Amino acid sequence: MTTTQPGDPAPAGPQGTAVRTGPRHSAVVVGGGLAGTTAALALADAGVQVTLTEARPRLGGLAFSFKRGELTVDNGQHVFLRCCTAYQWFLDRIAARDLVTLQDRLDVPVVDAASGRLGVIGRAALPVPLHLAPSLVRYPHLSLRERASVGRAALALRRLDPQDPALDRVDFGSWLAAHGQSPRTIEALWDLVGVATLNATAGHASLGLAAKVFKTGLLSDPGAADIGWAAAPLGDLHDGRARAALRAAGVRVLTRARAQDVVADAAGGWRVRIDTGPGRGEELAAGTVVLAVPQREAHGLLPAGALEEPEMLLRIGTAPILNVHVIYDRQVLQQPFLAALGSPVQWVFDRTAGAGLTGGGQYVALSQSAAQDEIDLPVAELRARYLPELERVLPAARGARILDFFVTRERTATFAPEPGVGALRPGQATAAHGLFLAGAWTATGWPATMEGAVRSGLHASREALSAIGLSREYDVLEAA
Ligand SMILES: Cc1cc2nc3c(=O)[nH]c(=O)nc-3n(C[C@H](O)[C@H](O)[C@H](O)COP(=O)(O)OP(=O)(O)OC[C@H]3O[C@@H](n4cnc5c(N)ncnc54)[C@H](O)[C@@H]3O)c2cc1C
């Protein structure tokens, strides 16, 4: 076990320059997901000497890629919206804008598997909320009466304050029913968007979180819901470009380095003991520690007294997302993505170019949120269920040859956005001096998203900097 002190010889920085020029503030960030990477960058940008320690061999946390033969596969399809200002700040900070696509204008094709009918959720060049009205008027999957009821509910939703703690105790489904929404309206519109963004059906989602999503995405700015996605493997962004940005900022990045415990030292700082392999370890000393790990791991690492009720972290549930990956011998999906109704299929994305498939076939990935009932089903069963469904949703798949079929399962993809979760999410500052929390599960007002993760990292670093007298403001936190 070696102990690294803040004043130890520095690793080489960009162009071989020494990063550490003398005694200054030091921080250890535990966890190299988006929250931890953000916190590390923000602290380093303010002049803090940062070590980022990540248990896995790669950065990116829950949004990563892996190789499967010639393909680079994302563990799960990720999208962001134009209103995700913090995540876009992150993309700029890691110089990865060129690796994403962002729609010029919201355009979501929605097919009804039973009728084959295609509708579109889009926006017009009109002020909010009228920007959605033409698309709603033409939306073929709802009756005239249902479309009118959606307009009335949207106006009522606009008046809600997502931060009102009373909303967090109510479920979105009950609120929708009380506002005249039929089961079909919930399925064909509210859940279509809500399940993908919240990772729960309306009946299992906090009204506060649902109000946050719908108000910010659909009822704030006309372009807020324009959809963005990675045009390259997620790992190229969240690992490759992120590592390069961290290196350039002088952050020491340790991978395969799992934090074992965090203890206060006699000098008023912290010591983080990390395990770097069988029989190997290191002890990192720093004035500031940011724990940017999932809630259960944070509970295990938190020193006594840091939170008043640490066991609340264990009451924050988790929810799964399943991705079903199919490679066809031909093109079966014409659009970049498609949402489906009347089928177990939820959203289908074209990953052909992003994953590096060549040769004329097409690689589609199904993103199946709130997948509690399917997450543990055998591959053969999922294959028997989804291939015929894809033929219903994508007629061009009928007769196409399947070149590959596999699934990726993320059992703890997000925190469960159920009613009451808002009261369990802690802020980023703790009662322990110099110790902070980050992670999509901390209190950001957002559901578990890349946006929430980046926001939490910025909040944590803002708190940490303010504690050492280095104040920083981030405009992106005020937006949305
Ligand atoms: C399949 C799937 C689809 C998703 N789709 C979307 C989407 O479309 N849009 C969207 O915005 N969000 C989506 N999300 C959610 C999004 O990926 C997460 O909210 C976000 O990435 C969480 O980031 P984080 O940094 O808070 O946590 P994490 O990504 O969980 O990062 C925590 C890190 O800490 C590390 N760690 C844990 N313990 C230790 C330890 N003791 N020592 C050191 N390191 C440790 C872990 O290895 C991990 O890298 C999706 C998630 C999944 C899984």
Image (cartoon, grey):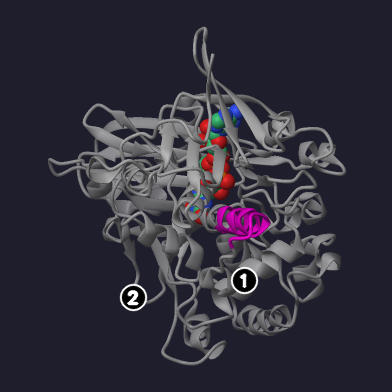
Q: Quadrant of the N terminus?
A: top right
| Residue depicted at 81% across the width and 67% down the height | 167
Question: Magenta stretch?
Answer: 455-470
Report if the CB atoms under discs 1 and 2 are less than 8 Å apart: no
| Residue depicted at 70% across the width and 62% down the height | 209
The CA span between labels 1 and 2 is 20 Å
Residue 142 picture quarter: bottom right
Number of the label disc, if any, that sits on residue 214: 1
Q: Whole-percent x and y of residue 235?
A: 35, 41
Q: Mainly helix, strand or loop, the magenta region?
A: helix
| Residue depicted at 49% across the width and 68% down the height | 85
Q: Whole-percent x and y of residue 429?
A: 72, 52
Q: Amino acid at mark 1?
A: Phe
The mark nearer the N terminus, 1 or 2, is 2
Closer to the camera, 299 or 267? 267
In this view, the residue farthest toward the front is 22
Q: Is residue 64 above or below residue 349?
A: above
Q: Is residue 3 above or below residue 299?
A: above
Number of the label disc, if any, that sits on residue 37: none
| Residue depicted at 80% across the width and 49% down the height | 424
Number of the label disc, if any, that sits on residue 104: 2
Q: Is residue 315 above or below residue 248?
A: above
